[in-house]
Amino acid sequence: MLTENSAPKNRDSKKMPRILFVASTKSQGGIERHAVELGAEMHALGVPLQFACSLGSFVQKWCAERKVPTQTFSVRNSGDLSAVFRLAKIIHSEQIEIVHAHSRRDYVIAVLGVGLARRLSRRPIRLLLHAHMIRPLGGASFLSNRFFAKGTDAVVAVSGAVADQLRAIHQFPPAFVYLIYNGIDFHKYHYPGSAAYCDHRTEARLQWKISSEALVLGMIGRLDAKGQADLLSIASALLREHPSVHFVFIGSEGEAGTAANLTQQAAAGRFETHLLLTGPRDDVPALLPGLDILVHLPKDEAFGLALAEAMASGLPTIATKIGGCREVVQDKITGILVPPGDLSALSAALSALLDTGSGPPLRAEMGRMGRSYVEANFSQDRQIQRLLSLYREITNTALPKL
């Protein structure tokens, strides 16, 4: 049984196992970006790690930029049997000992591919499924419960909300689901008031053509997934009270037509000059100082990486009171949680943070508390050490400390 704090059972071996991260998706989102950053940092620390990813995908591109080795691997769907054989071949030829699947579309393929590789190689090969979403791992639960429990060594959940959901849906034993919060490289995020922070803030505002005195509400993530339309629905009323407010949305479009719809929404409210859609960016830490508040309004959220990143940059946050958001944001301390779809509560939260008198000190205090909370709970170092602890557990070895 896996436990979060259990010690290795065998200290004879010091060999670091060869690890394969699997992420065949071609999307460019927070999950993909986080998986590459995690893998790149582990590789830089000396972990023999490589990615199985689609040719020409953003994952492959980011891995190349970070000098992380890759194997070309594509998946049509979860029933793609040819992908099972391709994955098993990679595992066998590369002498992989731990397969760590990050993309939900790869879970079934990973279980079957690892099972086949075990037969080909006649050696133990461990499998982890990393659950980045509040979703079942697979199809009908009465089939998938046994399928995943038998073929997988452990499931990593990015939040307590995800862990609870997986245990409830799949009836997994509590210790089979291993809670490891997402982590960020804290050193990339600058403290408000520092020289680097001020430089990035000036550069971001110049890029966006927004004055330094304006108040900027930012949203990070797919334009169809984080409640951008909800925020714009109260924008006209907000601008009547706070005419200097601007809205900067950073992220890919998601569903086709979403960007056009948001632009039309702004035009209909006659505040189109106050809305900027930047598209996807891979320099988020440098852009965050240009914001004043991070707004995050998804209908469901496994963790909320954008929230942790904003808090690391000393920004107050407003988020929906759901899923992982409740574990990242401390209500009334590091930010404000609002019920999903409650526009009155959203307006009240924004009014409190934008108030000309009490707003600036409140934003500063929430930002200070948020940065401390992220440093203590959501650092990349902490995530890597907990992940290595899990690797030690499932391989029954005492891996070298990094």
Image: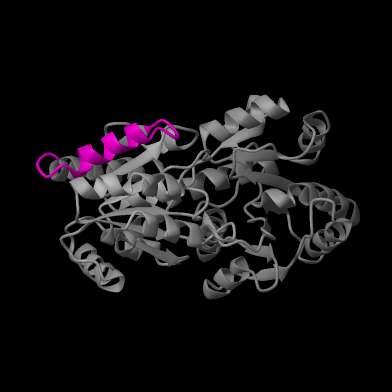
Q: Quadrant of residue 77?
A: bottom right
The picture places residue 72, in percent across and down from the top left corner, at 73, 70
Q: Nearer the viewer, residue 7 or 366?
A: 366
Q: Quadrant of the N terminus?
A: top right
Q: Residue at x 63, y 70 (%)?
A: 69
The picture places residue 144, in percent across and down from the top left corner, at 79, 35
Q: Nearer the viewer, residue 152 or 400?
A: 152
Q: How many marks?
A: 0
Q: Is residue 340 magenta?
A: yes
The picture places residue 187, in percent across and down from the top left corner, at 34, 58
Q: Nearer the viewer, residue 29 or 219?
A: 219
Q: Residue at x 55, y 69 (%)?
A: 62
Q: Is residue 177 placed above or below 48 in the rendered structure?
A: above
Q: Is residue 172 visible?
A: no
Q: Is residue 221 placed above or below 394 in the rendered structure?
A: below
Q: Is residue 129 magenta?
A: no
State left or right for residue 393 relative to residue 346.
right
Q: Residue at x 51, y 65 (%)?
A: 44
The picture places residue 34, in percent across and down from the top left corner, at 52, 56
Q: Quadrant of residue 318?
A: top left
Chain part drawn in magenta: 338-358
Q: Is residue 144 visible?
A: yes
State left or right for residue 19 relative to residue 312.
right
